[in-house]
Image: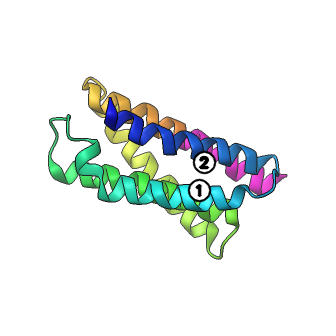
Amino acid sequence: MKRLLVELIPLGIFIVAVLLKLINIPYQSWIIFFDGFLLMIMYMLLSFWLFEDSAIRIIYKVLIGFVYMFTILVFMFLLFNLYGVLLIVGAGYTILLCHLLNCLFKIKTPFYKQHFYRSMLFLIMLTLIYIRHYYY
């Protein structure tokens, strides 16, 4: 339960900050930057601890942590309109879709089902931010 809260609290703050950034509330950039940085560190460096309950290999834990870390980085590139954003967004979609397909093939396992839903959330958020950023 403690691991779930450690992950959900920064992720919830990040999602709320992204939604507030999309409707142009001031000073949300600082929250997105610091919370996104915290999430990237958490997913990459603490992936062993976060996904300790699962019976998967260590390399998969590291790869899942990298996928989520890179997705948060793509969000930050897209929200801050940094240089090379289209290349980063394309790479983010590719990595996220590969992870989504991997989870879809192993959906019978509860661990991968949880990551399938989280990847779908990230994919929907990334698509909404991309549409909002480039078409409005």
Query: Residue 102, which numbered label?
Result: none
Main secondary structure along the magenta-highlighted residues: helix
Q: Position of residue 52 (x, y in %)?
A: 20, 40
Nearer to us in this view, 48 or 131: 48
The span picked out in magenta is 122-136
- Residue at horizontal 40 percent and vertical 60 percent from the top: 41
Judged from this view, the residue extending furthest toward the front is 2
Q: Is residue 3 magenta?
A: no
Q: Which residue is mark 2?
A: 126
Task: For mark 2, give the secondary structure.
Answer: helix
Which residue is at 63% across, 66% downward?
86
Side (left or right) of 116 relative to 63: right
Residue 32: x and y, percent?
62, 56
Q: Residue furthest bottom?
A: 83
Circles 1 and 2: CB atoms closer than 8 Å: yes
Asked if the magenta segment contains residue 134, the reply would be yes
The residue sitting at 77% across, 57% down in the picture is 134
What is the x, y in percent for residue 6?
39, 41
Q: Is residue 14 left or right of residue 63?
A: right
Q: Would you name the residue on which mark 1 appears?
A: 75
Nearer to the camera, 35 or 91: 35
Q: Amino acid at mark 2?
A: Leu
